[in-house]
Amino acid sequence: MIEVRGLTKRYGDVLAVDDLSFDVQPGKVTGFLGPNGAGKSTTMRMMLGLDRPTSGTALVNGRPFAALAEPLREVGALLDPGSVHPGRSGRNHLRVAARTNGIPERRVEQAIELAGLGSAAGRRIKGYSLGMRQRLGIAAALLADPRILVFDEPINGLDLDGVRWIRGLLRRLADEGRTVLVSSHLLSEMQQTADRLVVIGRGRLIADATTDEILRGLGNLQVRVRTSESGPLLAGLQAKGFTAQRVDDNELQVDDTTAEQVGDLAHALQVPVHHLTEVQQSLEHAYIALTSDHVEYHGGRPEETR
Ligand SMILES: Nc1ncnc2c1ncn2[C@@H]1O[C@H](COP(=O)(O)OP(=O)(O)OP(=O)(O)O)[C@@H](O)[C@H]1O
């Protein structure tokens, strides 16, 4: 369990993290989502005792990270996959980490296996792709078999197979009852990966709920209705105050409603309905709506829409 309370970090004029409070619970994958510069890395660094909060606290199992008796056994982290000795092999890097931290040697091979490093474990790190470096960082995080995992953008640099693999790994770790916090600016990824979402923008908390609740809470359900009498139905919907528009001659889209409401209205208007579906807008839409006022650097288009 990680408890963040009133966490604040100021760098000169920049308020990187602004009075954040949330919990990261065991047994779930919690997505930590926000646009670039939102303060995700700074928050994670404070959780891990690498940065000192200006005010507020981040507690790991009820204590500040610095007060943990065996921090590596309690928390595994992937922060900066670049910070490794390039001349060593992945296996040697892990062996050194194990030895320095009193972790049994057998964990090295287990971590290599868990992270899917395979034969790359014997090669020098300087020849690793970004994806391999990510896997090595994940192996290091898993080395001491910790109950809490904090991964900063673990999907960066991974190919499609790697993305699927990490999604499965995060799920498995959470299913084992571990606390899993994973940051990302990739909404589509978090939508498929996270049970809960903590969404931040400009250092402030925007939303903290289950992924489903966040989508539903935004009232983002759309209904598509197919009918041979789209004209009368469209007029009837608009007369009742619904936001409705044509998709084509026989299909309408109605925003912020349910299939039940549209079906009932069609029935009352005696309009035949051939097909009626609820469409959940992607998290991408929800996220842009949520964070549009909180993006630090507005470009022509938000980067997240790529
Ligand atoms: N050491 C530092 N000195 C000054 N400003 C910093 C420092 N570290 C972070 N910041 C600023 O704090 C804000 C939050 O940065 P942070 O890296 O935590 O965001 P992030 O959500 O992790 O973004 P990204 O996805 O781009 O990594 C940014 O405005 C950043 O420029």
Image (spheres, helix red, strand yellow):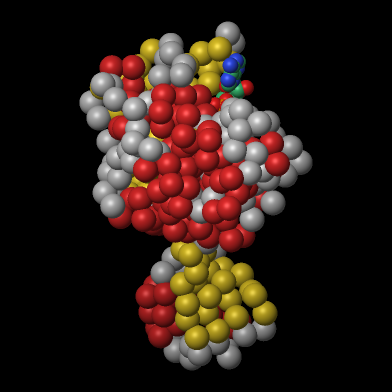
Tell me which residue sits at (61%, 33%) in the image.
88
Image quadrant where residue 55 sits: top left
On screen, residue 300 above or below 47? below
Q: Position of residue 67 (x, y in %)?
A: 28, 17
Q: Residue furthest top?
A: 12
In the visual, does 297 lie left or right of 254?
A: right
Total number of numbered discs in the rendering: 0
Tell me which residue sits at (43%, 42%) in the image.
108
Q: Residue furthest left?
A: 62
In the visual, does 239 lie left or right of 20?
A: right
On screen, residue 98 above or below 287? above
- State the residue in front, 174 or 54: 174
Image quadrant where residue 160 sits: bottom right
Q: Position of residue 282 (x, y in %)?
A: 53, 59
- State the residue in front, 296 or 32: 32
- State the residue in front, 101 or 275: 101
On screen, residue 194 above or below 92? below
For ligand 1, give the image quadrant: top right
Task: Mark yes or no: residue 299 visible.
Answer: yes
Q: Position of residue 31 (x, y in %)?
A: 44, 45
Task: Mark yes or no: residue 82 visible.
Answer: no
Tell me which residue sits at (59%, 29%) in the image.
84
Tell me which residue sits at (44%, 51%) in the image.
114
- Quarter holding the N terminus? top left
